[in-house]
Image (spheres, rainbow, N blue to C red):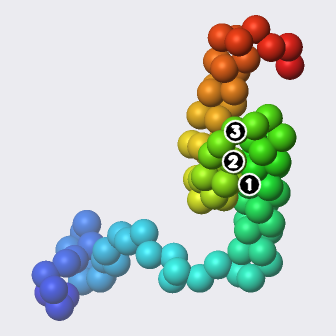
């Protein structure tokens, strides 16, 4: 019997490795740099659009876009679309 009581399917004493999702927690620097650059560009574009259109919370939209672009940017787009629709402004 193998230490820990884990044996292969045939009982041949082969140790079975437990399945884990651990990737070691390491991200190459260039991947990190690319991700931060993309997030910063999305954030700056969101802030610039909000600021130019008189949104009083432009900074919050920009920070939110940097931290969670996949959630905040679609919400911002829908909010702008609804506001323009309500006020009858052209795009």
Q: Nearer the viewer, mark 1 or mark 2?
A: 2
What separation in Å lies between label 1 and label 2 (alpha carbons)? 10 Å
Q: Secondary structure at mark 3?
A: loop
Task: Name the residue beneath numbered marker 2.
Answer: 58
In the displayed structure, 65 sits above or below 85; it is below
In the displayed structure, 74 sits above or below 35; it is above
Task: Name the residue beneath numbered marker 3.
Answer: 55
Q: Residue at x 64, y 25 (%)?
A: 78
Residue closest to the eye, 64 or 33: 64
Residue closest to the eye, 8 or 44: 44
Q: Which mark is residue 43?
A: 1
Of callouts 1 and 3, which one flags the residue occurring earlier in the amino acid sequence? Answer: 1
Of callouts 1 and 2, which one flags the residue occurring earlier in the amino acid sequence? Answer: 1
Q: Residue at x 24, y 83 (%)?
A: 13
Q: Which mark is residue 86?
A: none
**Image position, residue 63 (x, y; %):** 63, 58
Badge 2, how many Cα within 10 Å: few under 14, some, many 20+? some
What separation in Å lies between label 2 and label 3 (alpha carbons)? 6 Å
Q: Nearer the viewer, mark 1 or mark 3?
A: 3
From this viewpoint, is residue 31 visible? no
Q: Residue at x 57, y 42 (%)?
A: 71
**Image position, residue 62 (x, y; %):** 68, 53
In the displayed structure, 59 sits above or below 7; it is above
Q: Quadrant of the N terminus?
A: bottom left
């Amino acid at each position: 019997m193998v230490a820990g009581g884990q044996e292969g399917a045939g009982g041949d004493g082969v140790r079975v490795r437990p399945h884990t999702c651990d990737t070691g927690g390491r991200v190459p620097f260039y991947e990190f740099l690319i991700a931060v650059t993309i997030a910063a560009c999305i954030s700056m574009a969101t802030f610039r659009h909000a600021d130019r259109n008189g949104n009083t919370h432009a900074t919050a939209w920009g920070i939110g876009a940097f931290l969670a672009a996949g959630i905040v940017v679609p919400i911002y787009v829908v909010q702008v679309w609804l506001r323009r629709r309500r006020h009858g402004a052209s795009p």
